[in-house]
Amino acid sequence: MSPRYELLERIAESGQGIVWRGRDRETGRAVAVKQPGGPSALVNIANPHVVRVLECAPDTMVMEWVEGTTLEARGRLDEAAFDALVRQALDGVGALHDAELLHLDLKPENILISGSGFQILDFGCVQRAEDARAGLRGSVHYMAPECFERGRLDARADLYALGCVFYFARTGRTAFEGELKPQVVTAHLLHRVERLPGKLGDWIDRLMARKPEDRPASAHEALAEYAAIAQIVADA
């Protein structure tokens, strides 16, 4: 980590690493410092719906400090907030994918609600798209079925996770449920989910399709599909 930044206080620790509150010695502004880090390409992403990464190396990542609450804490959203979530989250994820990165840990806890709207954070599981492989990373409730199997992953794994996030934001509960982790995994693999009604429900279920080829090919395609549905609903 550059000597420009100093560590002040440990604020979180999990299987994904340690997060510190830090300070930029040059500006005096607060920053978040995560250990370990991630792909250096994260610093090239300048999207209002992705928390800005200021410095990134394999051992340490420095991010802007953003005050807010998480979607997990907020729970079910009203219509206007849900619309903003979908548009902004897909825009942010699209920016990650355009940089040839996969997030692979999209969940309500990792979507921040701040004065800038909805922002994606926590890049502890990010992989370069060309290197992404299946593995047990992130929260089991939001992992695509292919993450439990062997093989390559692509952008559609993130779209599946977003479908699960949107389901949560719409209902206040997880799409795939179980008392134990193996039961949740089985629910994903067998697509045991209570489908939501209407065209929006169909679209969310398409994001969560069991097979990647049955999902939208990209975040941009998913956003275009959503915009068309939202317009039909508005005109009805």
Image (spheres, helix red, strand yellow):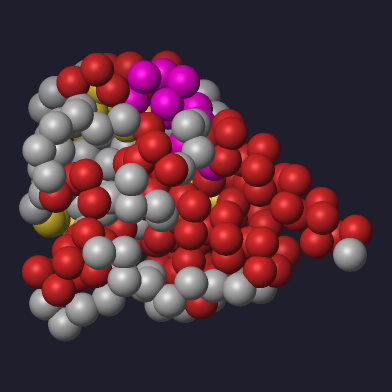
Q: Quadrant of residue 42?
A: top left
Query: How many badges with numbers are in the image?
Result: 0
The image quadrant where one finds the C terminus is: bottom right
Question: Please, is residue 99 above or below residue 5 in the view?
Answer: above
Name the residue furthest bottom: 179
Q: Which residue shows up at 61% across the image and 73% down it?
A: 197
- Residue drawn at (21%, 44%), measured in percent from left and top? 146
Q: Is residue 154 visible?
A: yes
Quarter holding the N terminus? Answer: top left
- The residue furthest right is 235
User: Looking at the picture, how far across and down is residue 216, in whole percent?
Assistant: 50, 38
Seen at 22% across and 59% down, the residue is 189
Q: Nearer the viewer, residue 208 or 33?
A: 208
Q: Magenta-highlighted stretch: main secondary structure?
A: helix
Stretch of the chain drawn in magenta = 90-101
Residue closer to the observer: 187 or 165: 187
| Nearer-the-camera pick, 223 or 188 | 188
- Residue 233 shown left or right of residue 139 in the figure: right
Q: Position of residue 167 (x, y in %)?
A: 48, 66
- Report x, y in % for residue 173: 41, 77
| Residue 95 shown in magenta | yes
Residue 4 figure quarter = top left
Q: Is residue 22 magenta?
A: no
Residue 19 image position (x, y, % from top left): 20, 47
Residue 22 shows up from this direction: no
Q: Is residue 26 above or below residue 135?
A: above
Residue in front for this viewpoint, 163 or 15:
163
Say left or right for 114 vs 189: right
